[in-house]
Image (cartoon, coloured by chain):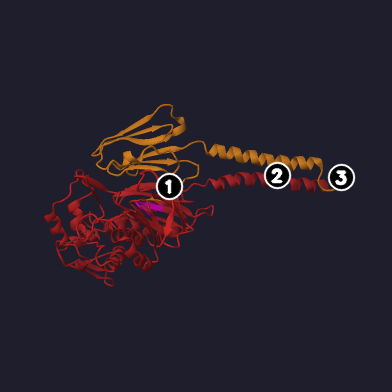
Chain colours: A orange, B red
Amino acid sequence: MKSRYIKKADLIFIVGGILTAIVLYILFNSFLEKGNTVIVKQGSDVIKTVNLDTLSEPYVIEFDGEYPCTVTIDKDGAYFSKAECPDKVCLKTGKISRTGQTAVCLPAKVSLIVTGSDAEQYDAVTG
Amino acid sequence: MKNKIKMLMLTFLYLALLCSAVGCSILEDEQPYSDSSFLMGTFVTTKVYGDDGTVSKKSLDEVAELEEKISHRVPMSDIAKVNSARGKKVNISEETAEIIKTSLDVSKKTNGEFDITILPLTTLWNFDNDVQTAPNIESIKDALSHVSYKNIAFDEDKKTLSLSDIESGIDLGSAGKGAACDAVLSVYQASGKSGIISVGGSIGVCGKKPNGEKYLIGVRDPFNDSGTICTLALENSCISTSGSYEKSFEQDGVLYHHILSAKTGYPVQTELVSVTVTAESGTVTDILSTACFIIGEEKSIPLLEAYNAKAIFIYKDGTIKASKGLEESLQATDGKTVEYI
């Protein structure tokens, strides 16, 4: 028995629409989640913005001043590789790579912030 | 005609599906505008949804302005003026007065175990110094003799403040970061935007995230520098943590941390490693996290109740205790158990 309202062509049209929507959704998401970026700041000034996916070899930034420190960024993340500050909290933080993670050297006023489109594990950390 | 209507309806349906697919992606991935700076001797981060940078910038400006009023290190701040006024009354701002009011109330409720006239001691210990050593007992006794909240004369109506002991000094280090959260949350509320502010260990959240979820705050694991021991889901509230791991040094096998006792002049002797407090006001959470760390769990219960605040106590042996009422929002990580008190 033939349906009065929905024909085979209509069904193909609807299923096609749904499939196209799913494909677009996946493509859109994969486009957004292309990779994380590390922002390196000294005080309030952005010193460098590095997309981790574009790195073929480690990128190193050296900071002079009262508390010299060195930041190393590779495709797996960013970290303070050297620091002459008294507390060494920045060195203890280790490598950061997930969206929202930060590594900070308070005495040198240097910060590393990972930004990206993937969901953050936490919105902030207290302590 | 019938076919035309059907084609039109199907086209609408098709477009609706495409729009919802793309729309869902955008909604799921909406990112807040974020900015950061070094203020109040710490790292300050803003995250505001739907912001073009205006609200974030205004927020950081607010924190900088507050620092100019309450930091004892800023020469023309309210507090620096009071500390150097040699007993004379000093007119203070509304913001400073609010912090003094809460601080004094907590000082009274803790019988002076929490005390904002601790500057002679914090200066002596100087945990920010490049080379750290424990001061000798004589200098600690001398500094301690000038520490008492009873030296403070505060007129709430006239907004005046003075110190009766000219060697005494106010240090709002245990309240300022939380007060900064309050100031920024007022900016967020006025803008009608949802966001989060992080000032060192103090955090304030305004509203919920655009996807309807509460903000998820990790509580740092005192035993693992880069980990979290539990999480709290929050909306329209603040949270602060005081921990003995924050600033410390070791000398002759003894670990000296930065939370000083206003009764002994030495770092507080306790089995606690950190106390996290959540409440509506950041000033309250900042002050109470320090006060509760000093007075311990048992004495903290009535203090927390007085401020409608809740706390998480973490002990050296790894025990986690939390206020009743946090059961739904608190989630311990790695299968750890929480005892509710």
Mark sitting on residue B34: 1
Measure the alpha-carbon separation of dots 2 and 3.
23 Å
Residue hosting label 2: B14
Residues packed near mark 2 inside 10 Å, few (<14), some (14 to 19) or many (20 plus): some
Q: Secondary structure at mark 2?
A: helix
Q: Secondary structure at mark 1?
A: strand
Identify the amino acid type marked 1.
Answer: Ser
A78 to B43, vertically: above or below: above
Residue sitting farthest toward the left: B138
Evaluate if marks 1 and 2 touch, with contact meaning CB atoms under 8 Å apart.
no
Q: Position of residue B175 (x, y in %)?
A: 30, 59
Left or right of B198 in this view: B162: left
On the question of residue B184 being in view, the answer is: no
Measure the alpha-carbon separation of dots 3 and 1.
58 Å
Q: Position of residue A1 (x, y in %)?
A: 88, 45
Residue hosting label 3: A2
Mark sitting on residue B17: none
Mark 3 or mark 1, whichever is nearer to me: 3
B43 to B313, vertically: above or below: above
Q: Which residues are magenta?
A: B197-203
Precedes in sequence: disc 1 or disc 2: 2
